[in-house]
Amino acid sequence: MSRMERMERLVVGMLAMICAQTAVAQVYKCVDERGKTHFSDQQISSCKNGAVVNRPSPAAPKTAPTPRSTPAATPKPPQTEHEKMYFVSRCKTLKEEEAWLLSPRGSAVQGRDARLGNVRQALNDCR
């Protein structure tokens, strides 16, 4: 490969990187009355509490994900038979996950303490 070909590839590569950074679009976030979050590339007209989400640039270093926390609001008690069955199933699954996290095999899980805290917080709704 000649010097000229290498220079052309370098210039094309740099142009591609510059164009890729300018192609980042804005993302709009809206939380509706029921607490459900919606994302869109256009502003949501029916949203009263919308916000623009600042996305990191492609060159930004990735950080470790933060553990998800459960919402602070207390959920309503189940109303329908389906909701009751789901509630019972969810509580059973949370109890099993708590037992697994406390077991010797669960002690090797990355972020175990934070996850165990989230499980116990969610289990408070079951008691």
Image (cartoon, helix red, strand yellow):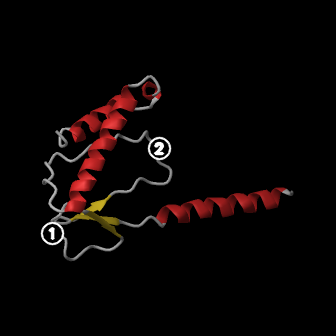
- Where is residue 118 shown, x and y percent of the image? 28, 38
Asked if one can make out residue 112 in the rendered structure from this viewpoint, the answer is: no
- In this rendering, would 41 be left or right of 49? right
Is residue 94 placed above or below 38 in the rendered structure?
above
- Where is residue 101 shown, x and y percent of the image? 38, 30
Q: Mark 1 points at which residue?
A: 48
Comes first in the chain, label 2 or label 1? 1
Amino acid type at image mark 1: Lys
Q: Which residue is more in the foreground, 118 or 79?
A: 79
Is residue 29 placed above or below 123 in the rendered structure?
below
Q: Is mark 2 on a helix, strand or loop?
A: loop
- Where is residue 35 shown, x and y percent of the image? 20, 60
Extreme residue in the right direction: 1
- Where is residue 24 shown, x and y percent of the image? 44, 64
Q: How many numbered circles are shown?
A: 2
Q: Is mark 1 on a helix, strand or loop?
A: loop
| Image point (86%, 57%), residue name | 2
| Image point (41%, 53%), residue name | 56
- In this rendering, would 33 be left or right of 99? left
Query: Counting other residues with Cα less than 10 Å from the Cα at mark 2, is it few (<14), some (14-19), or many (20 or more)?
Result: few
Q: Name the residue under label 2.
A: 62
- In this rendering, would 127 be left or right of 90? left
Extreme residue in the top direction: 104
| Image point (66%, 60%), residue name | 13
Q: Which residue is more in the foreground, 84 or 58?
A: 84
Amino acid type at image mark 2: Lys
Asked if one can make out residue 61 in the rendered structure from this viewpoint, the answer is: yes
